[in-house]
Structure formats: structure tokens, C-alpha cells
Image (cartoon, grey):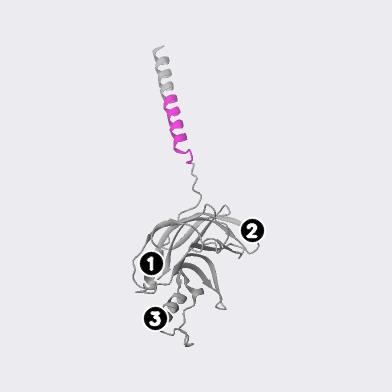
């Protein structure tokens, strides 16, 4: 009788250990649920987000650029210098406001040396001509990159702000020119005022439009690029 009881206790102990082992294995193999379906890039310069619901990433060293020749020419003309050599130093009241642009773009060049832009981020600002002690344009471009949240240039009601382009996998170019109600861009950081470019980084969500009036959303974008000075 004692022998049977001992055998029963041993069998019960073994069964309990087996049950605990199975329970432990189930806990270790339970999958973790995550809502992040896009792997964060490790590139120094990038644009990463979601376009029409699909994850997109641009990587590689971008091109920094500026557009400020009109401003320089207007300043030269006002101070008695004929910038374009036409002998005309008269002020043009229609050109009192001059657009400045600084930004970054990712491009590739094919075998025929044709440049193809895959994406760009610009900051645009219309400045009033400064007639006394004009500020250098590199300082103006740098100031445009001040960390802040602001709206988008739309070419109609808002002439200051951000301008975005993105080329999809089918080769269609989309731009942010159009209604941007509720869209904002944030510059979180910028580099130093040294040389011809500076690093800047931030986030944005924007409505994008193709040449046929179709609209898609480029959302939850984070970026780091080189802006011209």
C-alpha cells in the first residue's frame, strides 16, 4: 500500500512539473504586437514616412541648394551697381518683394547625365528689400531654418512656407502646391552657419498633388537633409 502511495506521489509530482514547463513555454513564445511597420533608417540624411498608406524612404547624401540671385541683384542695383550690365539702375516697384529659397533634394543621374529628382524639401520666404545695411543672403537662409512649426507655401494665398516634392515608384512627381489646410512642418534642429550648407531636420505631413489634380497624403514624415546657405 505504501509502495503504491509513493508511486502515486511521484507520478503526481512529475505531472505538475510537466504542466509548469508547458505553461512556461507558452509565455515565452507569445508574439509581441507592434504598430510600427516601418524600420527606422540609420542613414545620416533621409526622408522617411508613409505615402498613400505605403512606407517610403529616401536615403543618401542630398544636394543643398538656394535661390537668391534676384535678391542680390536688387541690392546691387539699389546701391548704384549695375548687376546685369544693362546700364539701368532704376528701382522697379514691381520687384520690391523678392523670394528666397533654401532646401535639400535627393537626385540620381542616369547614363545620359539626365538628373532625376526623387524628393525635395524647400523653405520659401518673400523678403522686402532692405535699403540700408542689407543682410547677407547666407544669414537670411540660415534664419529661415530656425527651429519652429510653420505652414506650407501654396502659391496663391501663402507665399511663405514649406514646399515638398516626391516622385513615386511609377515615376509620377507629386508636389505640395495646393490646399494644405491643417498641414504643418516642424524644423526640430539645424546646424551651424558655416560654409555653403547646414544640416536641418524635422517632421511634416502634407497633401500631395500630381499634374492631373489627384491628391494623396505624405504623412508622418521625418527627415534630415542639407540646406543651402
- Which residue is painted at 45% across and 31% down in the image? 23
- Which residue is painted at 41% across and 11% down in the image? 1
Label 2 neighbourhood size at 10 Å, few (<14), some (14-19), many (20+)? Answer: few
Q: Nearer the viewer, residue 134 or 215?
A: 134
Query: What label does residue 214 carry, if any?
Result: 2
Q: Which of 105 and 94 is in front in this view?
A: 94
Label 1 neighbourhood size at 10 Å, few (<14), some (14-19), many (20+)? Answer: many
- Disc 2 vs disc 3: Cβ atoms closer than 8 Å? no
Task: Point out the tag, 1 or 3, that comes first from the N-terminus.
Answer: 3
What stretch of residues is rendered in magenta?
14-32
Q: Is residue 51 above or below residue 97?
A: above
Q: Is residue 29 magenta?
A: yes
Q: Is the magenta stretch mostly helix, strand or loop?
A: helix
Instruction: Give how far across and how far down residue 11 sits, in percent.
Output: 43, 22
**Given this view, does label 1 or label 3 mark the residue nearer the observer?**
3
- Which residue is painted at 40% across and 21% down in the image? 10
Question: Which residue is label 3 attached to?
Answer: 79
Quadrant location, the C terminus: bottom left
Report which quarter residue 154 is drawn in: bottom right
Question: Which residue is label 1 attached to?
Answer: 142
**Given this view, does label 1 or label 2 mark the residue nearer the observer?**
1
Amino acid at each position: 500500500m505504501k509502495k503504491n502511495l509513493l508511486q502515486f506521489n511521484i507520478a503526481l509530482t512529475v505531472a505538475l512539473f510537466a504542466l509548469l514547463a508547458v505553461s512556461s513555454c507558452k509565455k515565452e513564445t507569445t508574439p509581441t504586437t507592434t504598430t510600427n511597420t516601418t524600420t527606422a533608417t540609420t542613414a545620416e540624411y533621409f526622408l522617411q514616412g508613409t505615402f498613400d498608406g505605403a512606407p517610403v524612404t529616401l536615403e543618401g547624401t542630398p544636394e543643398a541648394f538656394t535661390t537668391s540671385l534676384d535678391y542680390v541683384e536688387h541690392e546691387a542695383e539699389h546701391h548704384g551697381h549695375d548687376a546685369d550690365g544693362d546700364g539701368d539702375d532704376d528701382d522697379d516697384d514691381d520687384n520690391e518683394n523678392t523670394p528666397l529659397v533654401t532646401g535639400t533634394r535627393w537626385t540620381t543621374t542616369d547614363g545620359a547625365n539626365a538628373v532625376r529628382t526623387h524628393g525635395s524639401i524647400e523653405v520659401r520666404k518673400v523678403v522686402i528689400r532692405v535699403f540700408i545695411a542689407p543682410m547677407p543672403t547666407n544669414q537670411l537662409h540660415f534664419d529661415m531654418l530656425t527651429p519652429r512649426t510653420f505652414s506650407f507655401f501654396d502659391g496663391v494665398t501663402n507665399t511663405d512656407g514649406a514646399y515638398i516634392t516626391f516622385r513615386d515608384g511609377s515615376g509620377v512627381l507629386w508636389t505640395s502646391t495646393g490646399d494644405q489646410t491643417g498641414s504643418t512642418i516642424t524644423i526640430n534642429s539645424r546646424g551651424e552657419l558655416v560654409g555653403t550648407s547646414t544640416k536641418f531636420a524635422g517632421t511634416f505631413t502634407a497633401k500631395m498633388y500630381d499634374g492631373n489634380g489627384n491628391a494623396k497624403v505624405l504623412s508622418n514624415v521625418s527627415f534630415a537633409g542639407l540646406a543651402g546657405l
